[in-house]
Image (tube, grey):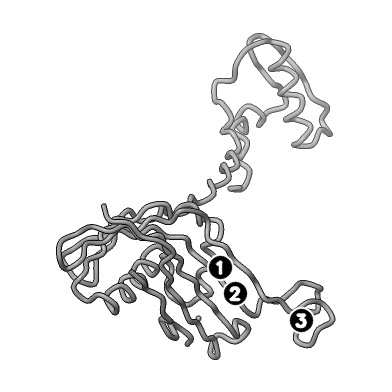
């Protein structure tokens, strides 16, 4: 059973202000009274000094104030980093109502941001499944894909413009101009006779002109490396 073809071009067009002193009433006179402690602040004492004297009297007495001062608002805890959405476990076949089981695509989570450069949508597992189905059904129209497993993290090769080359970034970073991404996939399908087959395959995307999304060109090739009947 041999399947090897070009899928053609796939995409192209990308604090509160500090609370008022709750001890204002206690500080309104010249004499501070707290649990029998008498202190007479100097007449020239400023408002901040009155607060300091009151705090000293409070500490000396060991008593608690009748009106507790409102605490300053706490700084909000930093937001937790968003957890990447898990890879879907199934997707609708292009032959509804059939569903295709998906697995192993979490292995490529680290490179998902690069797969977005293909312009095929945000969910890698789903667009890979759609492209696999398209090629399988092109060759064997009456087959039905049952499951697709990504065996390992996809391999990627990037084309870069480096510092000093025309069009490179002035800050010294390389600029990605092209990418080849290869997915090692196990595809299980049922043929028109009802037999179930397990195919070891490779789906490779070749994206060019990534500097200019309007001129981006993406092609894909699907190759069967081995197969066996279940």
Q: Earlier in the sequence, mark 2 or mark 3?
A: 3
- Please report the residue visible at 69 percent of the width from the left and 10 percent of the height from the top: 61
Which residue is label 3 attached to?
A: 168
Which residue is label 1 attached to?
A: 114
Q: Earlier in the sequence, mark 2 or mark 1?
A: 1
Around disc 3, counting alpha carbons within 10 Å, would you say few (fewer than 14), some (14 to 19), or many (20 or more)? some
Which residue is label 2 attached to?
A: 179
Around disc 2, counting alpha carbons within 10 Å, would you say few (fewer than 14), some (14 to 19), or many (20 or more)? many
Relative to 128, 107 lies left or right: right
- Please report the residue visible at 47 percent of the width from the left and 87 percent of the height from the top: 13
Residue 18 position within the rendered picture, expressed as x and y whole percent measured from the top left: 63, 43
Q: CA distance from mark 2 to mark 3?
A: 16 Å
Q: Earlier in the sequence, mark 1 or mark 3?
A: 1
Q: Judge whether 13 appears above or below 31 on screen.
A: below
Point out the residue furthest to the bottom here: 215
Tag 1 and tag 3, C-beta contact below 8 Å: no
Tag 2 and tag 1, C-beta contact below 8 Å: yes
Relative to 146, 218 lies left or right: right
Element marked by disc 3 = loop
Question: Which disc number belongs to residue 75?
Answer: none
Element marked by disc 1 = helix
Element marked by disc 2 = strand
Residue 29 position within the rendered picture, expressed as x and y whole percent measured from the top left: 68, 28
């Amino acid at each position: 059973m041999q399947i090897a073809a070009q899928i053609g071009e796939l995409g192209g067009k990308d604090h509160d202000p500090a609370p008022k002193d709750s001890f204002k009433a206690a500080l309104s006179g010249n004499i501070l009274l707290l649990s029998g402690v008498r202190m007479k602040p100097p007449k020239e004492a400023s408002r901040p000094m009155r607060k300091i004297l009151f705090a000293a009297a409070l500490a000396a007495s060991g008593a608690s104030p009748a009106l507790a001062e409102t605490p300053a608002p706490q700084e909000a805890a930093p937001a937790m980093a968003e957890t990447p959405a898990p890879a879907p476990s199934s997707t609708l076949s292009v032959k509804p109502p059939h569903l295709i089981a998906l697995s192993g695509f979490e292995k490529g989570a680290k490179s998902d941001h690069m797969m977005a450069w293909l312009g095929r949508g945000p969910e890698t597992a789903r667009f890979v499944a759609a492209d696999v189905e398209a090629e399988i059904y092109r060759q064997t129209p009456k087959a039905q894909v049952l499951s697709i497993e990504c065996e390992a993290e996809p391999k990627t090769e990037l084309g870069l413009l480096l510092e000093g080359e025309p069009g490179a970034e002035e800050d010294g970073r390389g600029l990605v101009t092209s990418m080849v991404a290869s997915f090692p996939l196990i595809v299980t399908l049922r043929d028109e006779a009802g037999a179930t087959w397990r195919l070891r395959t490779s789906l490779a995307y070749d994206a060019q002109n990534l500097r200019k999304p309007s001129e981006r060109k993406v092609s894909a090739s699907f190759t069967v490396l081995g197969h066996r009947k279940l």
